[in-house]
Image: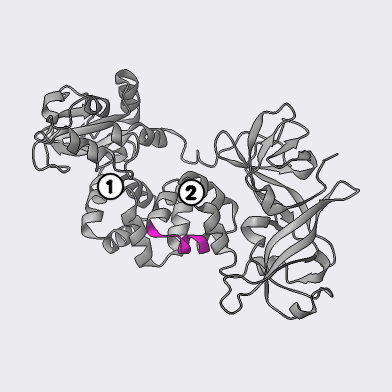
Amino acid sequence: MTSTLKVFVARLVGLVVLGPDGESIGRVRDVVVSMSLPGQRPRALGLAVELVAGRRRIFVPMGRVINIDADAITLTTGRINMRKLQLRVNEALAVGQILESRVQTDDPDHPELHGTALSVVDMEIERTRSLDWVVARVALRTTRKGLRRRGETVVVPWNHVSGLTALNLNRPGHGVELALAQFEGMRPADVANALRELPETRREELAAALDDERLADILQEMTADDQTALLASLKPSRAADVLEAMDPDDVADLLGEMPAAEAEAMLARMDPQESAPVRRLMLHSPDTAGGVMTPEPIIVAANATVSEALARVANPNIAAASASMVFVVRPPTSTPTGKLLGAVHTQALLREPPANLVAGILDADIPRLSPTDSLEVMTRFFATYNLVLAPVVDDDAHLLGAVAVDDLLDAVLPRDWREQEPEALPR
């Protein structure tokens, strides 16, 4: 029997989930609640747990919970269903969807709140004699009054709350602010996984509320179908702004999945300077080095100093693989016109005095890819030379871009690899 029979759901978020032998399985990110029929208390069906490995969210039934402590939840078994969490009809995420719901109360202990608009800030769940977990009480907050930043918070029995319905959860704009706060600090790939769990309307509302840079990072971690659907939900001008914030190679992959007329319309709305590298990438087949490469690697001239090169590497917006190497070209220092002289590995830069020139530590024999090289050729190339980044040059040695090993993996893996899950029994 669990040592805790009552708990507020917000307190569970972030707790470590342990197997019976103490191994860490993941962390609680939400609670799945069944929106029951009128007059019946909603049931807490299980936990949305983010796995330690893979950053995927799975469903863990509440019946598997044997103990809830201040910093961890222990399960009865370490054998759990590894299938990705998918909400069923009439199921909702407590924190992600129910909190911030607009409700009313007829609690006799708070007659002053009758007929007042309130918002849900937390829910208490309790374990019954039948071993089910049900919603017992609801924490409500009144609207702001006067100069107070927040209204009064009260806790009332569930049966004295009205308006907590599936229809209310789908109200436009509901819960957006809270969801954005949850996403703060999360990696784009983790946010992309979380968005996939939400209803389509909620995903679109959150996409509309995210800033361009953040949404661009998240889109790059989604499948092509999800990317296309979210972009289609945005106003055309906003969609163009988001595309401009994405990496050109990801934009080229995305537009390559669209009908030619739609892709051209998107490109026409983008700034010409932003769309130009995308157009160049789309000239190449997506399964070649020219189609996989990024057209914006780190590039300097031969007379650049080590400190100047390191300053370019330190840019936090540059991916780790792209920051592993600096390419040295003859002016102009931009693709696709600069002729490649060689490359300098970041490790070599760190060992040199800041005032030295990069020309002094140049690797002029760095292996190179051709834009027509196939995925198989690139795979063998990286395995042979033990690199994470490789330059792509034309027949005249002009630097066209660079292929990073993570982009190659994206191209080699199945198209729907982000959604593929291990075989598992239904919950």
In terms of sequence position, does the residue under pointer 1 or pointer 2 come before the other? 2
Residue at the image point whose x is 51% and y is 41% from the top: 418
Instruction: Work out whether residue 100 or residue 7 is closer to the camera in this orientation and state it.
Output: 7
Q: Which mark is residue 185?
A: 2
**Residue tagged by mark 1?**
282
Please report the residue visible at 75 percent of the width from the left and 35 percent of the height from the top.
75
Q: Is residue 128 left or right of residue 276?
A: right
Instruction: Specify start and end residues of the magenta stretch as a single range.
Output: 205-212
Residue shown at the point (55%, 35%) measured from the top left: 54
Q: Nearer the viewer, mark 1 or mark 2?
A: 2
Identify the image quadrant of residue 394.
top left
Q: Is residue 399 magenta?
A: no
> Which of the two residues, 58 or 292, is positioned nearer the viewer here?
58
Percent x, y for residue 81? 69, 36
The quarter of the image holding the C terminus is top right
Type of secondary structure dominating the magenta stretch: helix
Q: How many marks?
A: 2
- Whole-percent x, y for residue 126 in the image: 82, 52
Task: Provide the secondary structure element on which disc 1 rests.
Answer: helix
Tag 2, which secondary structure? loop
Q: Is residue 100 left or right of residue 243?
A: right
